[in-house]
Amino acid sequence: MNMTLGRLAAFAAVLTLAAQAQAATPNDRLYGAYQEDEVFLQLVDPLGVAQRYCLDIAGFPASGDVWSYRESEFTLIVHTCKTGIPKQAIATLDQMISRSALTGKPGRIRYSRLDACLSVLVPTRAQMEDFFKLGLFPPPSPDAPKMSPVMDDSDVYLAKCAETPEQQIVFDADGRVHPVLDPQKCLTVGEQAYKAGEEWRRRFLTFTTCSKAAAPRQVWAAAKP
């Protein structure tokens, strides 16, 4: 199967769902041409994937009502960028984000065609106490530095956009994305790639301690479609 046919096969069902939703409720915000402010959050290093990885939502919210899909409760992922296929603007509605929101001070990662933003999972005090009781983490000593609210390898997930610190980020000049709650953490792509169709790949996504060794999985670009 050649590259073009593989892409068509991988997205046949997705595009069918999107076309049905579009026919039922025409909506230029969801299915129209790309707007000037829309970009992909794309990993700079291809990690062996020619089309590179882009921030994505598990599943495909064809209706635009992301909260009606069970995948809205899943953690966010990266997926092969859905470029170079028919009806690309439809297929990428769950990959497009707002550049102005990304580069704001503070910024946030807002899906430009959906009522959704990236948020970091921050455990409550009660949850942390349970973790200590279960022995998952050693309790801090009285003289230990204050623990970061963002644990290492914290999951990221979808949330309705709001002015909450869990959604606020800094997109720095080096291309790293930091949560304002802990500038030592970086938005990081997982080491393991998983198949997501004939030619597509996906990886998990976390906020993990920034490091030189992990730089290939931590440096991003705002890429035009």
Image (cartoon, rainbow, N blue to C red):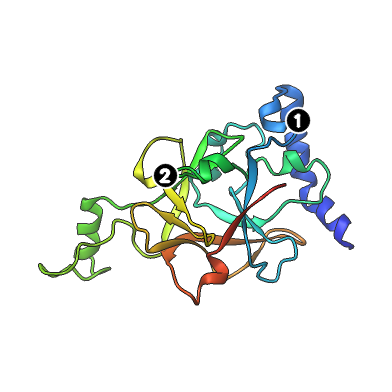
Q: Which of these two is toward me, 213 or 15?
A: 213
Q: Is residue 120 above or below residue 189?
A: above
Residue 16, position as x, y percentages in the image: 78, 38
Instruction: Indicate the amino acid at tag 1.
Output: Gln
Nearest the viewer among 208 and 79 is 208
* Residue drawn at x 52%, y 40% as measured from the top left: 101
Q: Which residue is mark 2?
A: 106
Residue 169 screen position, x and y as percent = 43, 49
Q: Residues within 10 Å of mark 1 (few under 14, many from 20)?
A: few
Element assignment for label 2: loop
Q: Position of residue 26 (x, y in %)?
A: 73, 23
Q: Residue at position x 71%, y 26% from top?
A: 28
Calculate the distance from the C-alpha at mark 2 to the C-alpha at mark 1. 38 Å
Q: Quadrant of the N terminus?
A: bottom right
The quadrant where residue 139 appears? bottom left
- Nearer to us of marks 2 and 1 is 2
Residue that badge 1 annotates: 20
Quick one: label 2 or label 1, which is nearer the N terminus? 1
- Toward the viewer: 49 or 34? 34
Mark 1 falls on what kind of element? helix
Can you tell which quarter of the image residue 144 is in?
A: bottom left
On the image, the x and y values in percent for residue 165 come to 35, 44
